[in-house]
Amino acid sequence: MIRVIALREFRSLLSMPSTWFVLAAIQFIFAWFFLARLDAFLEIQPQLAQIANAPGVTASIAAPLFNVIALLLMMLIPMFTMRLIAEERRNQTLALLLSSPLSSAQIVLGKFLGLMMFLALLIVTAPLMLYTLQLGTPLDHGLLWSNVIGLFMLTCCYASLGLYISSLTAQPIIAAIGALAALLGLWLADISSNSAETPWHQFSPLFHFQNFNYGLMDSGDAAYFILFSTVFLLLTMKRLNNNRIYG
């Protein structure tokens, strides 16, 4: 049943005209930044050729591009998570869903996986764009796929938090604003901390993405992403269970 719910959510996202408009806008931003970084790299390439161990095309173009994508997804994902449960509650279809034989875990995981299937399509366009560079120069595949894996786990964090916020309200707009405010708060707590040893850094998903962005697949960062996503998915399940019990 998880697969059925996931496919339903995936098809629902693809059927909305606004989804394609957002996708087109995001792809335009990705392409613009990619071409801007490529142009800047080509301008300084003669100087880089005279430097020993100069950064290659992957470090100069791919890593900054993934950083931009991570920030864009932080602002974009609340627009998609806002409707997952809040819209069901507003349309009064959540009660029907909760009265079905489906468990809260099946509902939450189905909606989460359906959204992640859609977001995976968005994420995969970045390496496809970057692999066009291999026509003229070798790429650092380790750095490239470290960024892809890190970005996917970061996206899971964003989606799980947004799904939980969506379960707290019947207004999708409020759910979007709440999720965006929470994600921005975590990010601002990171960038506003002056000391590298301050514990505030550890709460920010973007802080833990940085090692992946540098090509370092740290098990501690991976554990943080898994724990962050799991906690908010469990909180969402508990919220739906409470709705079943108390109406």
Image: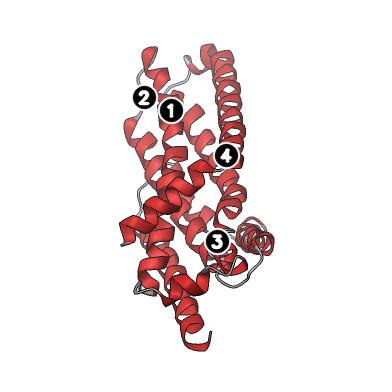
Q: Mark 4 points at which residue?
A: 68
Q: Distance between the residues labelled 4 and 2?
A: 19 Å
Residue 139 badge = 2
The residue shown at (43%, 48%) is 10
Whichever of labels 2 and 3 marks the residue nearer the N terminus, that label is 2
Q: Residue at x 40, y 67 (%)?
A: 107
How far separated are the C-alphas under marks 2 and 3? 34 Å
Q: Name the residue under label 1.
A: 58
The numbered dot on residue 162 is: 3
Of circles 3 and 4, which is in front? 3
Identify the mark nearer the N-term, 3 or 1: 1
Mark 1 or 4, nearer chain start: 1
Contact (CB < 8 A) between labels 1 and 2? yes
Q: Which mark is nearer the camera, 3 or 1? A: 3
Tell me residue 144's x, y (percent): 38, 34
Q: Position of residue 4 (x, y in %)?
A: 34, 56
> For the point 47% across and 55% down, which residue is it?
208
Residue pushed farthest bottom? 246
